[in-house]
Image (spheres, rainbow, N blue to C red):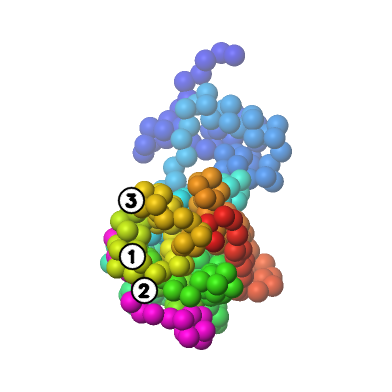
Amino acid sequence: MTSVTPRKTRGTGRPTLEQVAQRAGVSTITASRALRGLSTVGPEYVERVREAARELNYVANAAARALARAQSDTVAVLVPSLTNNVFTDVVEAIHTVLRPQGIEIVIGNSHYLRDEEEDLVRHYLASPPMGMIVTGFDRSEAARRLIDASGVPCVYMMELARAENLYCVGFSQEDAGEAVAKHLIARGCRRNAFVAAQLDPRMLQRGEGFRRTLQRAHLHDPDLEILTPAPSSIGLGCELFRQLITRHPQVDGVFFGNDDLAQGALFEARRMGIRVPEQVAIVGFNDLAGAADCVPRLTTIRTPRAQMGRTAAELLLSIIRQERIASPTVDLGFELVVRESA
């Protein structure tokens, strides 16, 4: 094919979408849809358009497109951490749903800080995205008002609530904590401790479910709770387990608010010569990587992280498309996975 130097746009010096469409022999709208990866465009047209874009060195002007529509082709996803596998699993699942629809996601990491999340909300709503997916309901009043007043469709994930015009996907954190307490009681554990770090709202909710169930069984001891705002980690789990057993050697059951804490406790128990579960039963939360490979294998609550991300993204798409929605609240539930540690 003869090499042709494309005519540039007057303002930017860049090839235009119209030039790509002309070279590919399709309409401008077809070229746009093909480059956005929409499934409504046949594969033969997609290849022709992409080949034309490569030959012309075309790069889409996202800012101009957003200005023309008063909205960007993005979805803002706000999470409190990108080092926690819980949220990386969710974000990856959201991406697998939205990307084939030609929608990119922008990820905001609040680091569990309300002020930082509020700044992110202001930033993303300045150039309104197609929609937003946010974590939980605990945020500043200003951030809440911004979201409500924006008119941007929003789905809340990880927690459940029922209110008018509110869409959420998650499970009951309190019910999960209750399930752990009932399991330890059924095993015959009578001195049950709760150990948690990070102390985000979901951690506190599962702790409340655990506490409430022990109270009903007249087995709750407030001294058997260790709560720290420090980031959750295996190393911290080692430290907190040793601290707990040193202070309360009669403890026979422990619920750790996250698997990494529980995995650290298993390591420390071996160092201390404490047999699990014969002397102390240990339960984690989330069923993270490695939980099934610990020694002993970790009993834990399996949370539907990938399903949550997919469902939240699908629900958001339905809202954007103004489709009929069966229920604005989607309870995905959880599973108590009983292994060797409890």
Quadrant of image for the N terminus: top right
The image shows residue 190 at horizontal and vertical percentages of 48, 75
- Label 3 neighbourhood size at 10 Å, few (<14), some (14-19), many (20+)? some
The image shows residue 10 at horizontal and vertical percentages of 38, 36
Q: Which residue lies under the disc numbered 2?
A: 224
**Is 105 situated above or below 336?**
above
Dividing the picture into quadrants, the one containing residue 34 is top right
Residue type indicated by callout 1? Leu
Between the C-alphas of marks 3 and 2, the distance is 20 Å
Query: 44 or 255: nearer the eye?
Result: 255
Q: Which residue lies under the disc numbered 3?
A: 235
Decide which of tag 1 and tag 3 comes sooner along the chain.
Answer: 3
**Is 179 situated above or below 286?**
below
- Label 2 neighbourhood size at 10 Å, few (<14), some (14-19), many (20+)? some
Q: Residue at x 33, y 65 (%)?
A: 244
> Would you say 307 lies left or right of 222 here?
right
